Amino acid sequence: MKKEQVVHCQFSVWYPIFKKHTIKSLILPLPQNVIDYLLDDGTLVVSGRYDVTQTHTYTARSGTGSKLVAPEFPEFTSTVLEAINALGGRVFPKLNWSAPRDANWIALNSSLQCRSLSDIFLLFKSSDFITHDLTQPFLQCSDQDSPDPVINYELVLRKWSELIPGGEFRCFVKENKLIAISQRDYTQYYQHVLKQEEHISQAIQAFFSQHVQYNFLDEDFVFDVYRDSQGRVWLIDLNPFGEVTDSLLFSWEELMSGGEIAHQLQDGPAFRCTTSEVTVQPSPCLSYRIPRDFVDLSTGEDAYKLMDFLKLKKSQQEESEEEEEEENPPQ
């Protein structure tokens, strides 16, 4: 995987080519001060939840009792809200390459649906995927000795669409040939996918040959599609052909070397899906989440856990005070 291939998979590069076959989206330049804020380890609280005039502040419990004011980006906030409204009031956010799929746990509805800039910031600042985009987009490229291309970072807002996970598929293209198709949400068993495997594969192959093949800038790439209830196929995303992209039910070794996949090509691309509930696997994004007890404590959903936590803290404080008295007896 070359750095040029990563550059070609930026949303703003491929979207104009396939605009007719994907979800309506708007692309906004990301100001440097916003990038700096996203990379800052400070507070998650931001202003601009509902309108550009609203602000949010909180008081830090420190010796000075200082008051911290949330950062404000009035012009950018106004631009983003205008774009969100133009897309129907609900959007799916992402950067040049990645969406914050690893951070949906922090949202109140456990969804990537956003209605405001603060919704977007909350997800972005909690996402390792977003941090990777901003700091190490060329980490796994083979041409590390070459200078990194200059990247103009962008906020991508996609019109919110209720996509059923069982309709999403990842497709692997090598030398402009569709070699493999994997169920996108391989952690779940979808009976209809197994039953309609042949029809799904044929629909994706037809979409690829009619709209994608030879139209992208590279010969090797990965693209995600969604097949709706009417059988129509939509392009969702494009990714580099390499280990930076999740190979799902395949391995990168077999995708790159050919082997069994290459022998099967005469009969069409290899198609893999979760075949029964026995083979269901845990979501890879679970490793990015915090313990459930922490969530309950932070939201106050479990009063008993909160009471136990406060009792524990009080007990620890008392023990600490006793130890200090033993170490420093009165003179």
Image: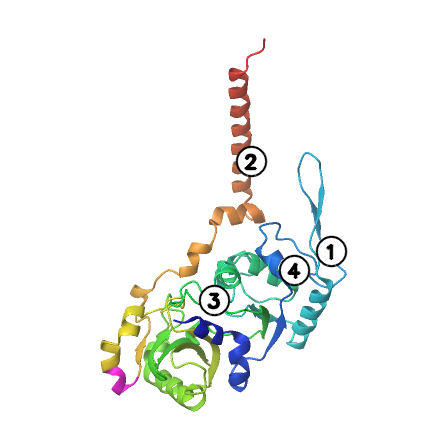
Judged by its main secondary structure, the magenta piece is helix
Instruction: Classify 10 Å Cα crowding around label 2: few (below 14), some (14-19), many (20 and above).
Output: few
Single out the mark in the foreground, 1 or 2.
1
Which residue carries the number 2 mark? 310
Q: Nearer the viewer, residue 32 or 16?
A: 32
Crowding at mark 3 (Cα within 10 Å: few <14, some 14-19, many 20+): few
Query: Which disc, if any, is residue 33?
Result: 4
- Indicate which label's residue lies in the foreground, 1 or 3: 3
| Residue type pointed to by label 1 | Thr
- Identify the magenta region: 264-268
Image coords of residue 217 (percent x, y) = 45, 82
- Earlier in the chain: of badge 4 and badge 3, it is 4
Disc 1 from disc 3: Cα separation: 41 Å
Q: Which residue is mark 3?
A: 147
User: What residue would you read off at disc 1?
Assistant: 55
Name the residue at 38% across, 78% down. Answer: 220
Q: Cα distance, mark 4 to mark 3?
A: 24 Å
